[in-house]
Amino acid sequence: MDTPLAVRARGITKSFGEVVALDEIDLDVAQGQIHGVAGPNGAGKTTLLGLLLGLAVADEGRLEILDSPVGRTLDAPGGVAGFVDGPGLYPSLTARKNLAALATLRGGDTRAADIDDALAQVGLTDVADDRVRGFSLGMRQRLGLAAALLTRPRLLVLDEPSNGLDPAGKKHVHGVLKRLASEGATVVLSSHRMDDLEALCSEVTIIATGRVVFTGPLGKLSSESQELDYRLLTSDRETARALALETPGVHLGDESGKDSGLLVVRALVPALDDLVVRLVHAGVALRELAPVVSPLEAAFLALTETESDAAPEHPSQQQESAR
Ligand SMILES: Nc1ncnc2c1ncn2[C@@H]1O[C@H](COP(=O)(O)OP(=O)(O)OP(=O)(O)O)[C@@H](O)[C@H]1O
């Protein structure tokens, strides 16, 4: 049986004056999934997440959240929490009092122990009684997440939650999101960092100029079907360079690392394998071999650059479904 959907969007369009921020977006997010939304600046990520949070309404299209159709008036759908453009907090109050005030505003029954627990989950126990005015961006992000946790959301929507997080903060936030998903909640988050998405998300949707250019499992995105640039450090650069020129499917890349013995080659994985075998047969030792840009990042760039550079009227959409 198909997993039920937490988000089902069809043909969502949203414009701001002349600017078409979202252009017939389709999106399926299965319940219990951590789903990433990626795209270049201005692609439409925040606009899309704002629609999920009920902060704006679409001009056209159908949106269903947690099995309920979203209407044409501004209203936060039940069971949904999160923030876009940073969490709304009271700078003059402490972290603990912020959470208490937000809980009072919502009118729910929130106990002091729940607030302590939310602060502990995001790693802010030590600064619980400090004023938010002095908080860094990363600490504010974590407090915003704690505020969302207090509502026990079934769908958590976060715009760039990793912004400003140090490694310890990131570990807390990733841990919280993974636990929520393992308990059946759904998380939709945006990020510019493909490594963050890789660490967290089972599926991603990539948007470029308001259109979906990829949606599906990350594994499908970073397939081996794409030529990449690789950094190659060997015991003998000149012989390695000559062998690279002889190997079918291998092209020389940027030569600026010549003085440090570095060779950059562009190839598909099978051609690269061939070159490595030739190096070994020639007695050239391989000291380092790594893609210049990670396969995920390269796929992201290829998809989004093609989209904005070529600006086709009907861009081909690469749709993969895990379901
Ligand atoms: N309130 C608004 N008024 C006018 N234009 C807007 C408004 N909100 C968004 N836009 C425009 O809509 C487009 C999409 O913006 P959006 O903020 O959704 O992109 P984004 O992918 O979140 O970008 P970034 O990564 O830079 O945060 C942009 O061209 C932006 O200028």
Image: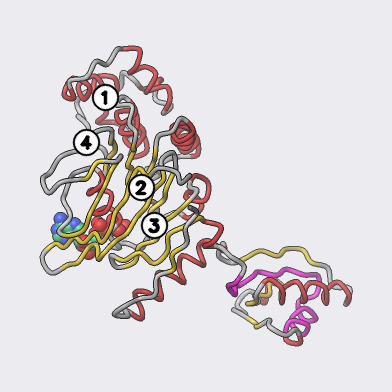
Image height of 55 relative to 250, above or below: above
Q: Which mark is residue 131?
A: 1
| Contact, mark 4 vs mark 2 (Cβ under 8 Å) | no
Q: Earlier in the sequence, mark 3 or mark 4?
A: 3
Label 2, secondary structure: give it.
Answer: loop
Identity of the residue drawn at 52% across and 56% down: 218
Whether label 2 lies within 8 Å of ligand 1 gets the answer yes
- Which of the two discs, 2 and 1, sits closer to the camera? 2
Q: Is residue 247 magenta?
A: no
* Image location (x, y in percent) of residue 79: 28, 33
Label 3, secondary structure: give it.
Answer: strand
Q: Earlier in the sequence, mark 4 or mark 1?
A: 4
Q: Which mark is residue 88?
A: 4
Q: Which mark is residue 38?
A: 3
Marks 2/1: CA–CA distance: 23 Å
Q: Is residue 12 left or right of residue 122?
A: left
Marks 3/2: CA–CA distance: 10 Å
* Image location (x, y in percent) of residue 72: 12, 49
Marks 4/1: CA–CA distance: 14 Å
- What type is the residue that disc 4 sits on? Gly
What segment carries the magenta color? Answer: 225-244
Location of ligand 1 given as a quarter of the image: bottom left
Identity of the residue drawn at 58% across and 72% down: 226
- Which of the two discs, 4 and 1, sits closer to the camera? 4
- What type is the residue that disc 1 sits on? Arg
Identity of the residue drawn at 16% across and 51% down: 57
Location of residue 6 by image quarter: top left
* Image location (x, y in percent) of residue 281: 89, 75
